[in-house]
Amino acid sequence: MKRDINSNGYIFLYATILVVVVAALLTAAALWLQPYQQINREKEKRVMILSAAGVNEDGNIELIDGDLPVYLVNGSIPVLPMQGNGLWGPIWGYLAIAADGKTVAGVTFDHKSETPGLGGEITTEKFQHQFAGKQVMDHGDVIPVEFDAITGATKTSNGVKEMIDNTLEKYSAYLKKFAEKGE
Amino acid sequence: MSNWKKLLIEPLRKTNPVMVLVLGICSCLAVTAKLKPALVMGASVTVVTAFSNLIISLLRKGIPSRIRIIVQLVVVSTLVILVDQFLKAFAYDVSKQLSVYVGLIITNCIIMGRLEAYALSHGPGESFLDGLGNGLGYSLILIIVAFFRELFGSGTLLGYQVIPQSLYEAGYQNNGLMILPPMALIVIGIIIWINNSKTESK
């Protein structure tokens, strides 16, 4: 029995089989690789939190889940998760508060799809370094953070600023309480 | 044997997909600001071109010609998703640097070009080598461009500082233009120029 390779029936059959085979293949690959990817993501998150807090990699992270999640590193340094928007996609990061409750201990940022060399520079040590010691509380109130933006990456820099300010605003109650304790 | 060599070597220079056919320029601009993503992108594209050529060549007698482009796209995108998943599982930091560009391999003109021009009319072994050769030719240009862009744009190679601190103190500055996409186009233009001037047929 010889089929006509260009008949409609054959085309439908061919397309259907192809798609089913491909779907099965991709599902199998996704299920097989998922645990490895999950480990990578967890590891990355851990490194980001610890490096924001300025603690080496065997630090201890504890998740305090009140109204808003706070990561407590080594039982003393609170680290706040941040989410925002860059130019091309989401950006996120972690902000550690110093023991005095008024200044930043350190930050880490990451992004989904900012331009390498421009917006992508927010992940570099050079950019993140400047945040340490910035004041975030003044007379019991949260104040916006000021920092040097990246030349050529205005949108991403604005996104970072918005993200930090929003996070501080959101956590202002927690920060006030923490600052009072610190005094 | 010589035929095998020809399939592998010719796309490096004589029929280079970027230099001579001027295909795949879009990703050349996007991933060449640093050397490391360029290397991984080159490797990923090479894997995808080689295997999509192989698969399409194996299927070529059964593919209905009216939906052949769709079949090619399905095969290519499946391979790209697999590469992306593998990178996420085993080379996480690199996959993050490449981010969206891995997905964009699907639209890389070199891959579709080789499938249409070669794999549909040649045997699996030859097609595989042709894909491999073209992928390597693409990688070669990617690496050359990324080398110059990272060296002059960031003063580093593969992330290591190459230009000494003393030079910066003497007033040297990284060229910010090198990091921006237009400079990739200019570098590719210069490469094509040099190549053409050397291979000019008399």
Image (spheres, coloured by chain):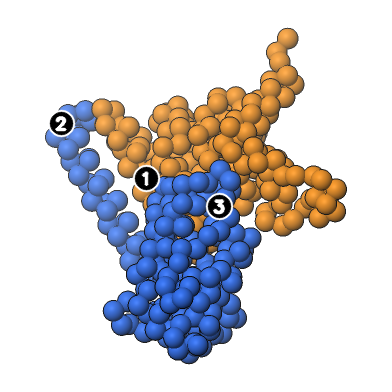
Chain colours: A blue, B orange
Question: Mark 2 packing: few (<14 Cα in 10 Å), some, or many (20+)?
Answer: few
Residue A86 in view in this figure: yes
Tell whether label 3 touches label 1 (CB within 8 Å).
no
Q: Is residue A11 left or right of residue A70?
A: left
In the rendered image, the residue lying farthest to the left is A9
Query: Residue B24's spot in the image, x, y percent?
Result: 51, 33
- Which comes sooner in the sequence, label 3 or label 2? 2
Give the numbered dot on residue A8: 2
Type of residue at label 2?
Asn
Front disc: 1 or 3: 3
Front disc: 3 or 2: 3
Q: Which residue is mark 1?
A: B77
Report the chain holding disc 2: A
Instruction: Determine whether A61 is above or below B60 in the image.
Output: below
Between residue B168 and residue B147, name the one nearer to us.
B168
SS assignment at label 2: helix
Question: Mark 3 packing: few (<14 Cα in 10 Å), some, or many (20+)?
Answer: some
Q: Which residue is mark 3?
A: A149
Between residue B52 and residue A76, name the one nearer to us.
A76
Query: Residue B175's spot in the image, x, y percent?
Result: 70, 40
Question: Mark 1 packing: few (<14 Cα in 10 Å), some, or many (20+)?
Answer: many
Q: Residue at x 20, y 35 (%)?
A: A11
Q: Residue at x 58, y 55 (%)?
A: A148
Instruction: Determine whether A29 is above or below A65 in the image.
Output: above
Q: Is residue A113 left or right of residue B159?
A: left
Residue B3 in view in this figure: no
Q: Distance of mark 1 from mark 2, alpha carbons?
A: 24 Å
Pointers 1 and 2 within a single chain: no
Q: Distance of mark 1 from mark 3, alpha carbons?
A: 38 Å
Q: Residue at x 17, y 38 (%)?
A: A12
Q: Residue at x 32, y 56 (%)?
A: A26
